[in-house]
Image (cartoon, rainbow, N blue to C red):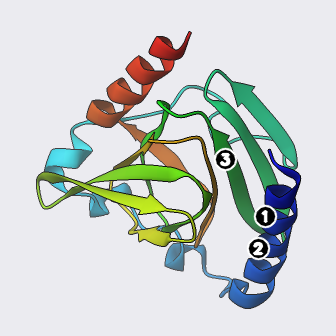
Amino acid sequence: MMPWAAGMAAALIIFCAGRWTAPRDSRPELYAPQLSDVADEVRAALYEPPPGHGVIEVPSTVRDARGAVHNLQVDGRRFNMLVTRAGSARSGDVHRSVQHDHVLSGRIRVTTREHGRDIAREYGEGESLAIPAHVPHMFEFLEESTILEYWDGPFEARYYRPYREQVDAATRALH
């Protein structure tokens, strides 16, 4: 990662933690809706990720052929900074909480499953997006990119088979 990107990412993390960290109600049911809230056609394609997915020591860095995921925690909120090669894909999952992403550099395509259709949108440097809870999504990296992501509640994921198969195929192609 470029030195300026590391500094910008650190500043963004500090800004986000100070600006968006709010006191939480102690009732967990407010932050963990049931998976029954996903669309029926989506629920049928969900499956448990392999052991360890999401249960990652924080802080840590996980590296593979796609690049690196830097796992951080600030004021009880989990942040991931992803530095990813062009041609890679990530995610292919669905969360119980809203996922927020900010593109620090590069260009990405995010595909979401909405109302029975796949919707693809592109985002570039400086742009942000929010993926609603219970919406399957997949990231394709059109350029080498650095993105910052966090969730409104605890991190928890289920894989969405149609997208996860694409992510796995893209990852195999990098080897």
Marks 3 and 1, the one that precedes in the sequence: 1
| Disc 3 from disc 1: Cα separation | 11 Å
Which quarter shows the C terminus?
top right
Q: Secondary structure at mark 2?
A: helix
Crowd band around label 1 with a 10 angstrom C-alpha radius: few (<14), some (14–19), many (20+): some
| Disc 2 from disc 1: Cα separation | 5 Å
Which amino acid type is shown beneath numbered disc 2? Leu
Locate residue 133 relative to residue 148 in the image: left or right.
left
Say if mark 2 contacts mark 1, CB within 8 Å. Answer: yes
Which amino acid type is shown beneath numbered disc 1? Ala
Q: Quadrant of residue 74?
A: bottom right
Q: Is residue 46 above or below residue 99?
A: above
Q: Is residue 129 visible?
A: yes
* Circle number at residue 159: none
Foreground pick, 158 / 2: 2
Q: Is residue 23 visible?
A: no
Q: Secondary structure at mark 1?
A: helix
Residue receiving disc 1: 9
Which residue is rendered at x = 80% and y = 67% of the image?
8
Q: Residue furthest left?
A: 116
In the rendering, at what x and y percent does residue 155 appear? 61, 56
Crowd band around label 3 with a 10 angstrom C-alpha radius: few (<14), some (14–19), many (20+): many
Foreground pick, 167 / 155: 167
Which residue is rendered at x = 59% and y = 33% of the image?
85
Q: Secondary structure at mark 3?
A: strand
In the rendering, at what x and y percent does residue 96 appear? 46, 61
Residue receiving disc 2: 12
| Disc 2 from disc 3: Cα separation | 14 Å
Which amino acid type is shown beneath numbered disc 3? Leu
Residue receiving disc 3: 82
